[in-house]
Structure formats: C-alpha cells, structure tokens
Amino acid sequence: MTNEQIDLLVQHQSDPVFKISFRKRNTVKGLFIMASDYAELKSKNFWRVVVDSKLQEYKKTLNADLTCIFYGNSFTRLNNIK
C-alpha cells in the first residue's frame, strides 16, 4: 500500500486500531501511533504501530518503546477494528 492510502485510513479514525495483512508475514492487529516523527516516517512509508499484545500496557504508559515500525509497501490490506 502507498503512504497516501494508509494515511487516509489512519487519519479518519479516532482510535486507529487495524488488522494489518502483509504480503510475507502473518496478520497483526495494532494501533497506529502519531508520534512526533509521524510526518517523517509517513514520507518514507514507515508506520509506528503498537501490536495488540502490548496495547493495554501502551495505553497505561504511552511508552514509545512498545511500538514497532512497519514498512507500508508490505501491507496488502487494512481492516478497521471497532
């Protein structure tokens, strides 16, 4: 997916938790984070995501070390989880 496609989906969600499908790895559920480096990462099609297993801890601590960075070109689909 392109950075424009991903940004369009992420920007229009109040709580951007998605099921992320990849080309060559298993599906991941995660929250897209708009940290201070969001614009820089977006320009290179990289995305900071907190995976589902660390989401509760992130919501309590807001610790950026709990995030992973994924390359958007490896995404095949994003499904919003409500």
Image: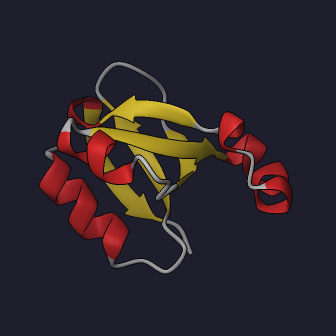
User: Along the line of sight, which residue is nearer the eye, 41 or 57?
Assistant: 41
Residue 61 horizontal/vertical position (percent): 83, 54
User: Along the line of sight, which residue is nearer the eye, 63 or 31?
Assistant: 63
**Is 79 situated left or right of 54 in this image?**
left
The residue depicted at 39 percent of the width and 60 percent of the height is 79
The residue depicted at 29 percent of the width and 67 percent of the height is 9
Residue 59 horizontal/vertical position (percent): 77, 61
Looking at the rendering, which quadrant does residue 13 occupy?
bottom left
The residue depicted at 46 percent of the width and 32 percent of the height is 69
User: Along the line of sight, which residue is nearer the eye, 49 or 27?
Assistant: 49
- Please say which color scheme the image uses: secondary structure
Residue 33 horizontal/vertical position (percent): 51, 55
**Is 61 situated left or right of 41 in this image?**
right
Q: Residue furthest front?
A: 36
Label tally: 0
Above or below: residue 12 compared with residue 68: below
Looking at the rendering, which quadrant does residue 68 occupy?
top right
The residue depicted at 41 percent of the width and 46 percent of the height is 37
